[in-house]
Amino acid sequence: MLVSQSSRAELEAVYGRLNKEIAEREHVIRELADQKYALDQHAIVAITDVQGTITQVNERFCTISKYSRDELIGQNHRILNSGHHPKEFFHAMYQTIANGRVWHGEIKNRAKDGSFYWVDTTIVPFIGENGKPWQYIAIRADITERKRVTEELARKMTELHRSNQELEQFAYVASHDLQEPLRMVAAYTQLLAEKYRGKLDEQADKYIAYAVDGATRMQGLIQDLLRFSRVGRAEPNLQNTDSYRVVELARAQLFAAIKESGAVIELGPLPQIVADGSQLVQVFQNLISNAIKFHGEKKPVVRIDAEKQGDEWRFTIADNGIGVIFKRLHTRTEYPGNGIGLSICKKIVERHGGRIWAESVPGEGSKFIFTLPSLPLPRQEARMVGEEMR
């Protein structure tokens, strides 16, 4: 049979197109195989029909579930049910995918040997021509270790919270119970000092003075511990608070120290905030007292300012003191105190959701800075209380 030149050219063109199409399909098949291999190396994959019967699984599904492929094919997916999730959990999941939407969540499954494992799961419905799903593909990632670490961390946090509560309770009870015997020791050592001062030798007077000083300092320490434990035991009573009035109350509490040192307290405009006013008084009282205490040779000057920065108020208490903080570099005779006041400030500020820190230059003074969240004021607008109120 003779084939014309034009027919031969057409056949060759068709043959060329077929070869090209075959090459393209082979390339697509190779790409799909590569993608399937990559997916199998990472993901746990199963395909089910709309009744939840397993029709296909990959090797990683078999590995994590400890079932063979033959044991899984034809089984309902409930074979993996761990009993951890309530019925409502799976009802909501099936409602989602039955309506043609993708579902994503974390599921705890039971393997063949009874062990449990967690998977991060995405279920994608395949929609038929009738607009309804005809099968589902579930792609999972093993998150068992991540869940174990998260649960262990949560358990440790619970234990730490309970331990802190017990420690605060112990500190409160111990400090409270120590007050009475210590009050008796302090009272009788003071009586000894008054009655026998100058009647014994100089060494005896010195020993009695040491005893009186030790008992007095111990009383102060116990009272501070009680104040510290009370801060931890009570949640802040948040309400509209005029921070200017809070500072005025703190200043009134320090009247004697301010008068004795000749301290000058300067106030910038201070805002209306949402806070526990009584706890905030303790913060300003401790920080102002600290500034007065470490004043050096110059008359102490303390400046208090507030500034709105983003979603928080930033308070600054600046002084012209010795500029050394957080370390006891001097004797108690020079600068008395035990440092618990700063711990109280830190706890109060943090329980309000703020932060506190210090900046200091030796010989040039210190700045204590703390922040408080700028919460909306109920039934009134935030305002600054300016110099006109002074």
Image (cartoon, rainbow, N blue to C red):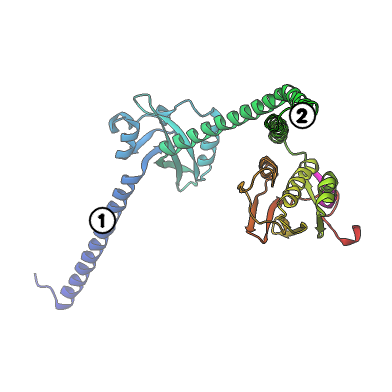
Residue at figure coordinates x 38%, y 26% from the top left: 115
Q: Nearer the viewer, residue 240 or 266?
A: 266
Whole-percent x and y of residue 224?
Answer: 71, 35
Whole-percent x and y of residue 45?
Answer: 36, 41
Q: Can residue 152 be seen from the camera position used here?
A: yes
In the rendered image, which quarter contains the N terminus? bottom left
Whole-percent x and y of residue 66?
Answer: 32, 30
In the displayed structure, would residue 273 be above or below residue 221? below
Asked which quadrant contains residue 203, the reply is top right
Instruction: Work out how far the residue at label 2 is from the one at label 1, CA to CA, in angstroms.
Output: 98 Å
Asked which quadrant contains residue 339, the reply is top right
Stretch in magenta = 239-245
Tell me, for residue 271, which label it has, or none. Answer: none
Which residue is disc 1 drawn over?
30
Helix, strand or loop at label 1? It is helix
In the rendered image, which quarter contains the C terminus? bottom right
Q: Nearer the viewer, residue 349 or 323?
A: 323
